Amino acid sequence: MSKYQAPAFLVDLLHARSPSGAEFEAQKVFDHYVKPSADSYAKDAMGNRIATLNTKGDPVLMLAGHMDELGLIITFVNKDGFIYFDTIGGHDRTVISGRRVVIQTSNGPIKGVTGKRAIHLMNEGDRKKVPEIHEIWIDIGASSKKEALERVSIGDTVTYDHEFELIHGSIGTARAFDNKVGAYVVGETLIRLAATKKKLAAKLVSVATAQEEIGTRGAITAAYAVNPHIALAVDVGHATDHPDCDQRKYGETKLGGGPIICRGPNINPKVFERLVKAAKKLKIPYQLEADPRPTGTDARAIQVGRGGIATGLVSIPLRYMHTPSEIVDLEDVERTVQLFVEFALDLEKGEYLHW
């Protein structure tokens, strides 16, 4: 067993089941840990959680990490009680079958298994095919449509039943490091800044955003509402240090190598420079990523909020993204919190990082 102690806040977020549009459990965790440290705390119609520290500070710095995860949604139950679904977010169809799942219902969680025809019952051609979503079902042990619908409902959401576990030292696996680590980082940054005796010039707004996996939707409304001068988004990024990953195409980043700081058109160059400066001051390892277009993260939406926002993006290295068993080094998560704390403290009054 690993002797590494994962932070309770992060562990509780990882256990929370929060597919896009059904972030209830993650909201409760964020409320519990972050609200007591905030000077003001709000929720909105999208399901975002918005925590503010130093309400009269200047500039306004927004931190955004999304708390939603991939999931499934029930769409149909056949006469024999087998449940069909559609996907929430971008799934790899090769890994859906044969998984234990949990259905969130109005009467509590229901356990099930994703099923498809066994390999013994397939011809050679079928064995080479990736099943379509409508060719996979969920089995909850019901014997009829009536019995199934007494336990679940159309529109109920589903998550994989793969929980957080440390597998070696600070390296852990979970179904939803993407992006519970980001929600943790923004919340934990506020908690630490509230506890520090160092003076904070900026107004800090930490937002656990909703519905990133289906189009950065929570970040769009949060950026409009908060109207920050500067923003940092935190998400997971691909660690390319495993077999079958062409670094000529995807760059060179590794687990345990520290936060990944992004450069490119989605990133304000002065924000990038300040992030690197902060990492060097703290003497923590960091990595660089180049992205030539708007990134697939909350940073994409925040950058073009209102009149434009000076935006940066930091990613936590992760292997096996969008699978039921993602892998992260929790030391990279801790370093990202430290980086965000230092970045916030380094801002001076009236500093907006325009270029």
Image: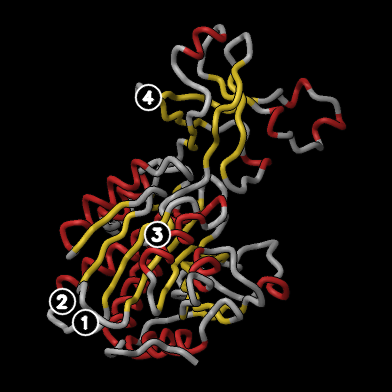
Name the residue type under label 4. Ser
Give me the C-alpha separation between circle 2 and circle 4.
Answer: 42 Å
What is the quadrant of residue 107 in the picture?
A: top left
* Residue 192 percent across, percent down from the top left: 21, 70
- Which residue is rendered at x = 16% and y = 83% of the image? 198
Q: Which dot, 1 or 2, sits closer to the camera?
A: 1
Residue holding disc 2: 196
**10 Å neighbourhood of mark 2: few (<14), some, or many (≥20)?**
few
Point out the residue furthest to the front here. Answer: 307
Give me the C-alpha separation between circle 3 and circle 4.
Answer: 28 Å
* CB under 8 Å between discs 3 and 2: no
Q: Which dot, 3 or 1, sits closer to the camera?
A: 1
* CB under 8 Å between discs 1 and 2: yes
Residue holding disc 4: 106
Give me the C-alpha separation between circle 1 and circle 2.
Answer: 9 Å
| Residue 185 visible here | yes
User: 97 and 77: which one is in front?
Assistant: 77
Instruction: Looking at the image, tell me whether mark 4 or mark 1 is earlier in sequence order.
Output: 4
Residue holding disc 1: 200
What is the quadrant of residue 226 in the picture?
A: bottom left
Total numbered circles: 4
User: 57 and 281: which one is in front?
Assistant: 57
Give me the C-alpha separation between circle 3 and circle 2.
Answer: 22 Å
Residue holding disc 3: 181
User: 262 and 228: which one is in front?
Assistant: 228
